[in-house]
Amino acid sequence: MTGAYRTSTDLVTEALANLGVLDAGQPIDPEDFNYVSEKLDSIFRKIAALEIVYVADPNNIPGAWFSDLADIVTGECATKFGVTADDYVRLINKGLGGVNGIDVGYGAAAKSLRAMMRGRPTGQPAVTEYF
């Protein structure tokens, strides 16, 4: 896929592929697609509250963030798709983190997104103190 931005549909499809739900040449099960799609808003709010990254428009996701966001969505939706306990730990820690001694917000994808956002302007006005 080319272009600087990806859509939430692309994100859901990638997460389902990461979970192993998609079969080659088969259409996406609408129930699976809807489940992951409905979770996106809460996942985006969670990563914004954890100050990882703020996704302003789910249909214009910067391409640089895409694979990390897909890993986070995959981990957050893994329990519905019957992954094994070992796969669950691997998927959660690859995404947002939160099991086996890794704090929530410090999984591999969360760290990667934080590193991308480090040093960027916040757009907030600077507070000035006059002496």
Image (cartoon, grey):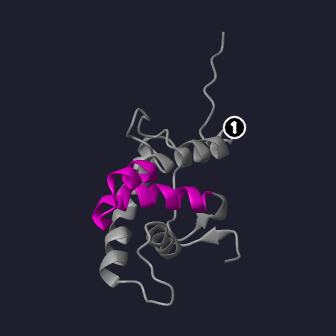
Q: Which residue is mark 1?
A: 119
**Residue at 42% in and 43% down:** 49
Residue 9 locus on image (x, y percent): 48, 76
**Residues in magenta, as a range:** 65-91
In the image, residue 78 sits, relative to residue 113, either above or below, namely below
In the image, residue 85 sits, relative to residue 104, either above or below, namely below
Number of numbered labels in the structure image: 1
Residue 104 locus on image (x, y percent): 41, 39
- Three-letter amino acid code at the position of disc 1: Gly
Quadrant containing the N terminus in the rendered view: bottom right
**Residue at 34% in and 61% down:** 83
Quadrant containing the C terminus in the rendered view: top right
Q: Nearer the viewer, residue 97 or 128?
A: 97
**Residue at 50% in and 90% down:** 25
Q: Nearer the viewer, residue 18 or 61?
A: 18
Residue 113 locus on image (x, y percent): 59, 47
The residue positioned farthest toward the top in the image shown: 131
What secondary structure characterizes most of the magenta part?
helix
